[in-house]
Image (cartoon, rainbow, N blue to C red):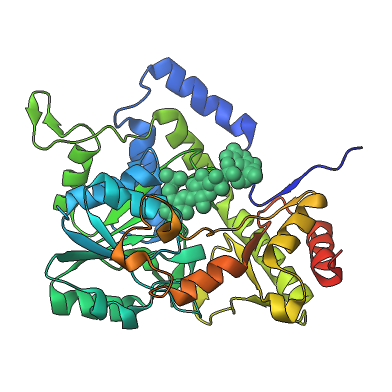
């Protein structure tokens, strides 16, 4: 039999036979979208599961980011990281906001809070950090800076589903956090996302903004957009919630197997396990230090591909290197040395609940043997 690709991610699918009764129910009710019953049930279930007070579902994480900026009326300049998926910075661009890139920390690959103050100008209104790969930013330091300068904080927490430190969800920090429920994520609604906020008034404002600004049949209170999640996807999300813990447990085992297999490979580095952190094991990034490893990152990437192992170079190129952003004064490589190095060395290894011990062994062997 022909070998199948080992993909970087694989969607979490609820049991099809459990989905059928939900679909029958939706068909019978003929209520397909616009804040239906399943939508309401999923918002409640996610609040409970994640340990947050208010959550608005969205049709994807990118629209959640765009609306979060609208909800807080952010303008001018926003300080952010170049080491993320393009959607982070695109959300600023779509709101006519100037991104200001700040370098990342080598320990976490998250924005370096010690460099934020130097990037603040009279036009700065907010900070948009990313909990990259689900590893929490230094939230206390970021909040202290925000409080000192009167700035808002919007976390792109697209990777941070279920991540808790000392039992507290990282989604409870900042003014707003956004999640992505894309098919490639630990938890998914096929496409989807959410904004987490901390008070009912803000929750209502976001409800309006994601539904054209409607606050009643004939009342439009803001220039909103259409970013609603439909009933079929909400039902899929309810069922996925039942299997997500099992999938995370499986990912944890695979991450441990990678750690064990790769710990003594000269020139291959990975992020350490952090005590007190409940992770979701969404990604397993390695850094390839070519001088020590004896092979360049892109050569290893191609070698893996030749074995049908589809790692991904998340996040290369840096956002600041894309044509839209590279002309910005903060986009220079001199301003972003750590992010530039990490982006040139990173490969995210396949990481999902469908991976087998044999898959991990094979990947480790290829990395060890360089052949
Ligand atoms: N902020 C951050 C920090 C993000 O990482 C993202 C999204 C966002 C914001 C925006 O959230 P969304 O608007 O997307 O909700 C993927 C995802 O499309 C994207 O959601 C994600 N981040 C980004 C990191 O990765 P691609 O282009 O790499 O995905 P793709 O289609 O190449 O899929 C990767 C692998 O997954 C495939 O080789 C096979 C497997 N796969 C994929 C899909 C879609 C499946 O097995 N089944 C599938 O249905 O972007």
Residue under the point 65% across and 66% down: 252
Percent x, y for residue 198? 23, 60
Query: Which of 198 and 48 lies nearest the eye of the viewer?
Result: 198
Query: Which of 30 and 209 lies nearest the eye of the viewer?
Result: 209
Question: Hey, which quadrant is residue 75 in on the image?
Answer: bottom left
Q: Is residue 365 visible?
A: yes
**The C terminus lies in which quarter of the figure?**
bottom right
With respect to residue 266, does 236 lie above or below?
above
Numbered disc total: 0
Percent x, y for residue 237? 48, 41
Residue under the point 39% across and 64% down: 130
Residue under the point 68% across and 66% down: 297
Q: Residue furthest right?
A: 1
Q: Is residue 13 visible?
A: no
With respect to residue 20, does 168 lie above or below?
below
**The N terminus lies in which quarter of the figure?**
top right
Q: Residue furthest front?
A: 327
Percent x, y for residue 219? 7, 28
Judge from the rendering whether residue 236 lies leftward or rightward of residue 32; answer left or right: right
Query: Which of 14 and 185 lies nearest the eye of the viewer?
Result: 185
Question: Hey, which quadrant is residue 261 in on the image?
Answer: bottom right
Percent x, y for residue 4? 80, 42
Residue under the point 33% across and 83% down: 114
Judge from the rendering whether residue 343 lies leftward or rightward of residue 166; answer left or right: right
């Amino acid at each position: 039999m022909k070998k199948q690709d080992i993909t970087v991610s694989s969607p979490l699918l609820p049991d099809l036979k459990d989905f059928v009764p939900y679909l029958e129910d939706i068909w019978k009710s003929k209520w397909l979208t616009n804040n239906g019953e399943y939508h309401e049930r999923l918002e409640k279930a996610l609040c409970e599961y994640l340990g947050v007070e208010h959550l608005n579902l969205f049709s994807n994480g990118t629209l959640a980011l765009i609306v979060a900026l609208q909800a807080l009326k952010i303008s001018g300049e926003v300080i952010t990281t170049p080491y993320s998926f393009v959607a982070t910075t695109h959300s600023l661009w779509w709101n006519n906001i100037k991104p200001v890139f700040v370098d990342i920390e080598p320990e976490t690959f998250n924005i370096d809070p010690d460099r934020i103050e130097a990037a603040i100008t009279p036009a700065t209104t907010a900070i948009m950090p990313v909990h990259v790969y689900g590893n929490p930013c230094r939230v206390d330091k970021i909040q202290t800076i925000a409080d000192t300068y009167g700035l808002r904080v919007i976390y792109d927490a697209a990777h941070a589903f279920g991540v808790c430190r000392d039992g507290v969800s990282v989604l409870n920090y900042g003014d707003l956090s956004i999640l992505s429920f894309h098919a490639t994520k630990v938890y998914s609604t096929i496409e989807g996302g959410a904004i987490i906020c901390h008070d009912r008034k803000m929750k209502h404002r976001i409800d309006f903004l994601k539904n054209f600004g409607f606050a009643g049949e004939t009342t439009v209170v803001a220039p909103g957009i259409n970013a609603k999640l439909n009933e079929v996807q909400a039902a899929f999300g309810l069922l996925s919630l039942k299997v997500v813990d099992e999938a995370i447990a499986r990912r944890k085992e695979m991450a441990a197997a990678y750690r064990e297999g790769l710990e003594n490979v000269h020139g291959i580095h990975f992020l350490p396990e952090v005590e007190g952190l409940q992770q979701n094991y969404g990604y397993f990034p390695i850094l390839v230090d070519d001088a020590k490893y004896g092979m360049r990152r892109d050569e290893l990437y191609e070698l893996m591909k030749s074995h049908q192992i589809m790692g991904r170079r998340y996040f290369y190129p840096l956002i600041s290197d894309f044509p839209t952003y590279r002309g910005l004064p903060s986009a220079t490589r001199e301003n972003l040395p750590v992010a530039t190095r990490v982006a040139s060395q990173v490969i995210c290894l396949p990481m999902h609940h469908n991976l087998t011990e044999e898959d991990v062994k094979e990947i480790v062997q290829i990395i060890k043997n360089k052949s």
